Amino acid sequence: AASSEDKNLMARVPQLNKES
């Protein structure tokens, strides 16, 4: 994945993890 895509995913991971 591109650097920008990776950054977006990492930024979303914490939120998704918290919701779970």
Image (cartoon, rainbow, N blue to C red):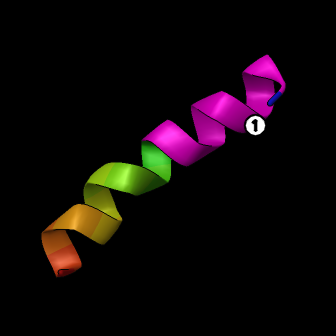
Give the residues drawn in magenta, as a range. Answer: 2-10
Q: x, y (%) of residue 19? A: 20, 80
Give the total number of marks visible in the rendering.
1
In percent of the image, x 63 and y 42: which residue is there? 8
Q: Residue at x 46, y 55 (%)?
A: 12
Q: Amino acid at mark 1?
A: Glu
Compared to residue 19, the image places residue 11 above or below, namely above
Q: Is residue 13 left or right of residue 17?
A: right
In the picture provided, is 16 more to the left or to the right than 10? Answer: left
Quarter where residue 6 is shown: top right
Residue 18 image offset from top left, x and y in percent: 15, 68
Q: Is residue 5 left or right of residue 18?
A: right
Q: Residue furthest top?
A: 3
Q: Quadrant of the N terminus?
A: top right
**Residue sitting at the far front:** 1
How packed mark 1 is, by other alpha carbons closer than 10 Å (few <14, some 14-19, many 20 or more), is few
Q: Main secondary structure of the magenta part?
A: helix
Whether residue 9 is in magenta: the answer is yes
Task: Give the residue drawn at x 57%, y 46%.
Answer: 9
Q: Would you name the residue on which mark 1 appears? A: 5
